[in-house]
Image: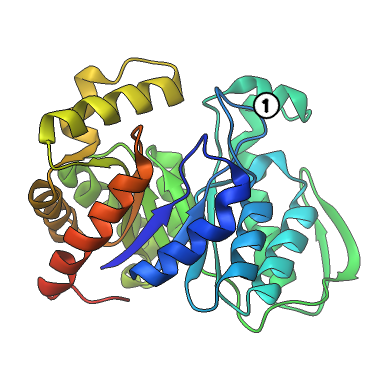
Amino acid sequence: MRVGLMFPPGADPREIPAAARRAEEAGFDFFCCGEHVFFHGPITNAFVGLAAAAGATERISLLSALTILPVYPAALAAKLVATLAVVSRGRFELGVGVGGEHPPEFEAVGVPLAERGRRADEALEVLERLLAGGRVTFCGEFTTIEDQELQPVPDRRPPVWVGGRRRAAMRRAARYGDVWLPYLVTPQRLADSLKQVQELAGENGRRPEDVRGGVYLWSSVDTDGDRARREVVSSVSQLYSQDFEGYADRYLLFGTPARVRERLAEYAEAGAESVVFAPACAEADRAIDLFATEVLPGIRERGVTRV
């Protein structure tokens, strides 16, 4: 199982280089930044944040979790992806979502909320063609490119992770994704959704096994399991500006290191080959240290291999 560390929302972005180095030294497989244009509190831009992380690290992979793809013109998104993939020496992995949790950010960039899915699908098609190299002509609903070549492009297309929960996101993952990354799901829902995505991939002429499973987990690890639960419920409720008390036991990862290891094993058995550990607690540094020293080794000892 590959395990990634999410840069905590609300944290000072000036700390990204140090946080990425820490993740690399602690043995995490990848480091993540999320993004919104506007949200309920401070949050990074994934491309800028991960560029800072790339300059501060040498080995760790870098995942945007998630790039809100429809807020970018498709050609600009392709340029940002290509540049970050090149400067990181191939370590960048592109996670995409359509957003929608905060409609004012779509209004601010002049993108109707109802168009976000179609824009994301078209952008993924544009990215695929531009990142393949060579001259491209494309005439779509939102994008027109007349005989242009994106330069430079990376030696290989960055892996694409598609996030979401709904059927449209599953179709997007089946067509364009290398990893299906649902969030706020139980292990059973992960298993069910991954099966659907892989079936859809087969219908699109792809091998079902070409789309692997992942899961994004808002988390809190503490020697006091009850405190861990209170912390993650409070933090995620504040982040989304809604009460998560009734959803915690199903969708959030929390508890002592032993409980967290067992819960992650359930997700692994459901098909998760990758997990994004997203600290959501007042003492994020403490939770990260506890996860790195008492959870990561247990995951490795179970014999779940990295991919």
| Residue 40 visible within the image | yes
Q: Nearer the viewer, residue 216 or 43?
A: 43
User: Which residue sits at x=57%, y=50%?
Assistant: 15
Relative side of 138 to 186, left or right: right
Q: Nearer the viewer, residue 128 or 22?
A: 22
| Amino acid marked by disc 1 | Glu
Q: Is residue 228 above or below residue 3?
A: above
Relative side of 167 to 97, left or right: left
User: Which residue sits at x=28%, y=31%?
Assistant: 232
Q: Is residue 55 above or below residue 49?
A: below
Q: Nearer the viewer, residue 155 or 24?
A: 24
Q: Quadrant of residue 183?
A: top left
| Residue 216 visible within the image | no
- Residue bearing the label numbered 1: 105
Q: Secondary structure at mark 1?
A: helix
User: Where is residue 74 drawn, in percent x and y?
Assistant: 74, 52
User: Where is residue 12 drawn, in percent x and y?
Assistant: 58, 41
User: Which residue sits at x=61%, y=42%?
Assistant: 44
Colour setup of the view: rainbow
User: Which residue sits at x=44%, y=63%?
Assistant: 22
User: Where is residue 1 drawn, in percent x and y?
Assistant: 25, 68
